[in-house]
Amino acid sequence: MIAPSGAPSLCAVPRRLGENPAVGARTREGIRHLAPRGRMTLDPGHVDAAERETGRLEAIAQRYRCGAGA
């Protein structure tokens, strides 16, 4: 089973990024693609895939925390 920290990231990170005015249209599209993929992997218990999608979302979030933007 995936670590409990993974599920909140798959819900909270996309929401926070969507509210960030610095996030561009291309990045928003990527977020809209990654978040559902990550959530789908939780149902059948594909831990590796869920962690990979969560990691991608967290990398995007980190980029905007650092002020880099895309």
Image (cartoon, rainbow, N blue to C red):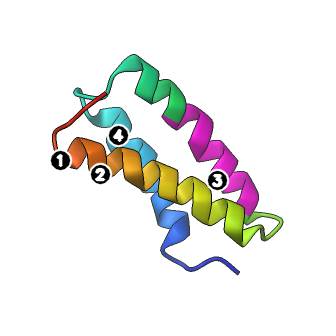
Q: Quadrant of the C terminus?
A: top left
Q: Work out whether mark 1 precedes mark 3 in sequence or the reverse, and give the earlier one.
A: 3
State the residue at coordinates (68%, 46%).
Answer: 37
Range of residues picked out in magenta? 31-41
Q: Work out whether mark 2 precedes mark 4 in sequence or the reverse, and give the earlier one.
A: 4
Residue ID for mark 3 = 38
Q: Work out whether mark 4 precedes mark 3 in sequence or the reverse, and give the earlier one.
A: 4
Left/right of residue 7 with respect to residue 25 in the rendered view: right
List x then y, in percent, for residue 16.
33, 45
The alpha-carbon separation of the residues under discs 3 and 2 comes to: 18 Å
Which amino acid type is marked by label 1?
Answer: Cys
The alpha-carbon separation of the residues under discs 4 and 3 comes to: 16 Å
Which amino acid type is marked by label 2?
Answer: Gln
Q: What element carries label 3?
A: helix
Pointers 2 and 4 in contact (CB under 8 A)? no
State the residue at coordinates (77%, 67%).
Answer: 46
List x then y, in percent, for residue 57.
46, 49
Residue 44 drawn above or below residue 63: below
- Name the outermost residue toward the top: 25
Give the class, few, some or many, for how many residues have Cα within 10 Å of label 2's Cα (few <14, many ≥20): few
Which amino acid type is marked by label 4?
Answer: Leu
Pointers 1 and 3 in contact (CB under 8 A)? no
Give the prevailing secondary structure in the magenta stretch: helix
Residue ID for mark 4 = 17
Mark carried by residue 62: 2
Q: How many dots with numbers?
A: 4
Q: In which quarter of the image is the N terminus?
A: bottom right
Residue 10 drawn above or below residue 30: below
The alpha-carbon separation of the residues under discs 1 and 4 comes to: 13 Å
Residue ID for mark 1 = 66
